[in-house]
Structures are given as C-alpha cells and as structure tokens.
Image: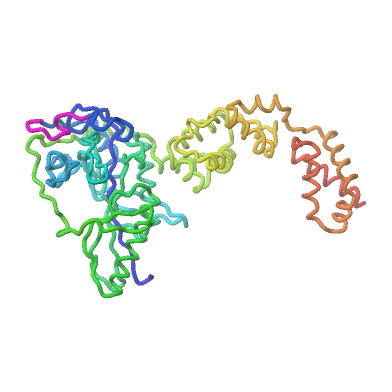
Amino acid sequence: MSEWKTVIGLEVHAEMETESKMFSSCPVVDSVEAEPNSAVDALSLGMPGALPVINMQAMEYGIMVGLALNCEIPPINQFARKNYFYPDLPKGYQISQYDRPLAVNGHINIELEDGASKRVRVRRAHMEEDTGKLSHIMGGSLVDYNRAGVPLLEIVSEPDISSAEEAEAYARKLRSILRYLGVNSGDMSKGLLRFEANVSVLHKNDTKLRERTEIKNLNSIRNMGRAINFEAKRQIKIYREGGTVKPATLGWDEAAQKIMVQRYKERADEYRYFPEPDLPILEVSREKVAEIAAKLPALPDELKRRFVDELGLSSYDAGVITAERAVATYFQSIVDSGVEPKLAANWLTTDLFGLMNARDVERETIASIPVSADNFAGLLSLVQEGTINPSTARKKVLPEMWKSGKSARAIVDEGGLAQISDTSVIEASAEKVLAANDDMVQRYLGGNEKVLNALFGKIMGEMRGKGDPAIVREALLSRLENLKE
C-alpha cells in the first residue's frame, strides 16, 4: 500500500444553536424528540410568497467559528439559491452561500497519536439552511420539516488529510472547538453535527489528483474512519485491476461494515446557483469582526499551552483535559481550590475517567456526575495533606463518593478511614507481621528482595490500609536492617 496515498477532504455540517430558524422566526426544536412537523411555518414548507429574513445571531455564530478556525472574514457576504429537488427540500432550492461565503482561508492544527502534528487548511465556512428529515417505511417515506430552515454552517477543508487517523483527529478537534464556542452541542446521534468525506487515492507516480467519491451522512467519528479506510482500499483495488473510479455519492452501511453506492454523479457540481433575490448583500464591518473576536472564549489550543506553561502539565495530559470544555472547567476548579495541578491531572485522567468509562459516562457530561468538582478537590486535598493514603482514596473513598454523592471528608470521618501516621502504632504492626511471617523474613535476609513488597502489603493489610505508606516502608526497612545485624 506504500505506493498509494489517500487524499481526503472533509465537509462538516454543524447546526447553529439559535432559538429561531435561519430565515424566519419559526422556533428551533429537537428534531428527534419533538412531534413531527410541530415547528414549521410558511417558509419551512416552501409556501409561495413567503419571504426570508436573515437570522443575525446565526451569522454571528458563524463568524465566531470562522475566527476560531483562523479564517479571514470577507467584508461582503451574499446568499444564493442552490437549485435541486428532494422531498425534504420543499422550495425546490436551498438558500446557501456560493462565491461570497462567510469565512475563507483558515486552518486547524491537529495532533496524532504518535505525537506528530499537522496543519489542515480550511477552504471556507458558509451559512445555509438545513433540510427536512426523511423516514423511510415499507412502501414509502415520511417527511418531517421541523429541521427544515435550521441554521447550518458548512465547513469545508482542503484535501490535506492523508489517513483515517488524521480525519478522525480533525473531526474531534473541530467538534471540540464548536463545543467550546457554545454554538453546537456536537451531538452526532441527533444529526446536529454531520460529516461527509471526499476520498480519492494517489499513486506515487501521479502528477494530479484522481477522481473522488463522497461518503455522505456519517453518524460518528469512528464510523467515518472505518468508511474512509474501506473506500480507499476499494479504489486502490479498482485501479490495480485496470478499472476507473466513477464520481459517486456513497453511504456507509454500519451493520455490514461496507460502502454502498447510492448514485453516480454526471458531473462534479450538479447544482445551479444564482444570487438569492429576496435577501440583501451583507457588509461585515471590521469593527463588527473585532467585536465578535473579543467575545471568543479561550479555545483548546490556548488552554493547552496555558496548562503546560503555567501549571507544568505534560503535553499529553493537557491535551486530554482540554479536549472537552466541561473537563477543562472541572479541572480548573480543582486547581483553583489549591490542589497541586499534576496531582489533579493524574487523578482526573486515570481514576475519575476510569470510573466514568466503567459506567459508560461521556466526558462531556462531567459537570453532572455524582462527584462534583468541589468534592473531588476535597478528596485530593485529603490525599495531598496526608489525611488519607492514595490506596484508601482510590479503593474506598472515591467509589463511595460516586455512589452516595457525599464529600470525601464525611466518608472518611464516618468510616474511620483517616491515615495512621503514629510511628509507634506502625512499628507495632510491623513487628507483629514480621513475627508471624518468619519464613518470608528469612528469604529477604537471604537476598530475595522481592519479598519486601509482600511484607509491606501484609503490614498495610494489618492496618486495614490506613497506614502512611512512607512511614510503613521506613519502619519495615528499619526492622529488617536490625535483623541483619
């Protein structure tokens, strides 16, 4: 496969979380939960004479995304009619943007699992209206127009992506940025964020790009990666067998784990655009762009740099924590309470994430888990000050916090779990364990140092896990050294 290279460009459709639709005052509702066709109006249904009015909140959200993607914001914006007919597009055309989009010439920096980084260029981001939703049933289809007219931002990358891994990293980064901005929830299960991959392959001897296919309506980032890998292999197989790849719209069959050809395209651009006569050309002043830029929150890359430079976290830990805005906020709250940042990062990314993973709890919902940021900070403060040892915190206190929602201090006090640091108590326990395990002591004295950890564990067991590990180890070593003499 080394003689072939995959070439990928992604089109991402993100619904903007506004109260009303893109070109009317019709409310935006949950298109999955709401009754079908309960949020429609004359414009949503394509009624003659219904005139569109631009939703300026949606435009501002789009500009926010453009700035976050390092795009230029052109001074002139214009909408166009994109003419094609589908049952879920009642007007027979979609109001979109064509040659005068909202944002152009941006980029996203992505990081891969091997630590490598890459810049993926963003060609454009343009605003349009979403279509309705088709439900196919035996013998026909049903149409729900609740989603028709919802503000939709389409973000188009350049074909800079060279693997499914890079595509997934780009998608995760873009989803994270949208969630940080608060303009899109990132919920792919409800179609609020949708990915389409344009895939072609390039032979090492090629001097120009080959024909591409488009994989539509990918409903998860993982499935997108699988679909890209499958399609790249399919195209390479066709070329090796002497065939040609035809431009086509493809679908991914998740159950069968394979590509399905939906239709072949007659030409690359099947649409007919012309300026939307019912909407004015928009002028975007530089002052307005500066005003919107000033509202942008700290984004993942900025927070990651801050956590590395100011808090001393590793690049990896900082990347994991800042991938989700809710996690970064949770972490910052812990650090602000006085917990040492590296300790907080370690416990968050291993112990708390472990509990969440075991219960299939998404990281983006961390603000609503039973262990609040304040209570988690309280637990780490007890560990940091030596009130409880790490083992007790992990095995007894944290699971009970998740189960009961109680504070760490309350659980420690109720269960008598406070760490024992009294040297005389620890030495007495060590003496008792050594006397009861003379065979192990003799093996240690004979040169088998591996026995040391077993003896340490027995002393901690004797003390019901409450001994201060450092003092326990010191007492154990002292007793064994005395026996050597």
Residue 454 in the image: state x and y as whole percent: 78, 49
On the question of residue 76 being in view, the answer is: no
Quadrant for residue 2, please give it.
bottom left
Quadrant where the N terminus sits is bottom left
- The residue drawn where x is 36% and y is 41% is 189
Q: How is the image coloured?
A: rainbow
Where residue 437 appears, as percent x and y from the top left, is 87, 48
Point out residue 422 in the picture as x, y percentages from the top left corner. Answer: 80, 32
Span of residues in magenta: 40-50
- For the point 36% across and 48% down, the residue is 171
Residue nearest the observer in this picture, 126 or 115: 126
- The answer to whether residue 156 shows anywhere in this view is yes
- Residue 403 sits above or below residue 319 on the image: above
Camera-side residue of 292 and 146: 146
Q: Is residue 236 above or below residue 451?
A: below
The residue positioned 73% from the left and 27% from the top of the image is: 416
Q: How many marks?
A: 0
- Whether residue 43 is situated above or below residue 159 in the rendered picture: above
Majority SS type along the magenta span = loop
Give the side of residue 398 with respect to residue 144, left or right: right
* Magenta span contains residue 62: no
Q: Position of residue 328 (x, y in %)?
A: 47, 37
* In the foreground, 257 or 345: 257
